[in-house]
Amino acid sequence: MRPAGRHRLLSWKASRDPRFDGRADPGWTDRAQVAKAIQYTNVNRDLAPEAVLAHLTTCVEYGFDAAMIALVRVRLAKDALKGTGVRVAATLNFPMANDTLAMKLAALRALAQTGVGEFDFPPNPRCLVGGHIVELP
């Protein structure tokens, strides 16, 4: 069953992942191996629970490494994916990436309490473009 809506494969795991026997280039010839390197992503916060469940079903069917979803659906995903081997991932501060360091730390603490398996955290574009290495308070 394919979920409705636009879904894209956005995140690839590093090829040096220990599940690939430490090889820098695992060859990517085995479909299951490729699937285990993918976080299938749909971070639309407005998805209805049924659409989130459809997204999770696709992740299980293909054996993806993780289902990347909006933070508001982490608890639903954790329950639905329990025992499947598919991890739950979420993103903080997306897409704007303009939170202060204090805001990021508070969000990380709250995220840790959800039990999410992995998260993405985009850097602040103004710091990258402006050449700022350290954020000012």
Image (cartoon, rainbow, N blue to C red):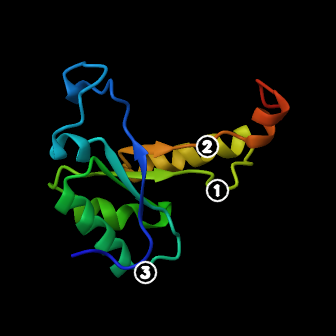
Please tell me how many numbered marks the rendered image carries.
3
Q: In the rendered image, which residue does mark 2 sit on? A: 122
Left or right: residue 118 versus residue 65 is right
- Alpha carbon distance from label 2 to label 1: 8 Å
Q: Residue 95 carries which label?
A: 1
Q: Which residue is drawn at 51% across and 44% down?
A: 120
Which is more toward the observer, 103 or 67?
67
Residue 38: x and y in percent read 33, 47
Quarter assignment of residue 67: bottom left
Which label was assigned to residue 20?
A: none
- Of the two numbered discs 2 and 1 on the same chain, state the one appearing first in sequence: 1
Q: Earlier in the sequence, mark 2 or mark 3?
A: 3
Question: Mark 2 near mark 1, Cβ–Cβ under 8 Å?
Answer: yes
Structural crowding at the residue carrying mark 2, measured as other residues with C-alpha within 10 Å and reported as few (<14), some (14–19) or many (≥20)? some
Drawn side of residue 96 relative to residue 33, left or right: right
Residue 112, quarter of the rendered image? top left
**Residue 29 to residue 31: above or below:** above
Residue occupying image coordinates x 62% and y 40%? 105
> Marks 3 and 1: in contact by CB < 8 Å?
no
Classify the position of the N terminus by image quarter: bottom left
Is tag 1's residue or tag 3's residue first in the polypeptide sequence?
3
**Label 1: which secondary element:** loop
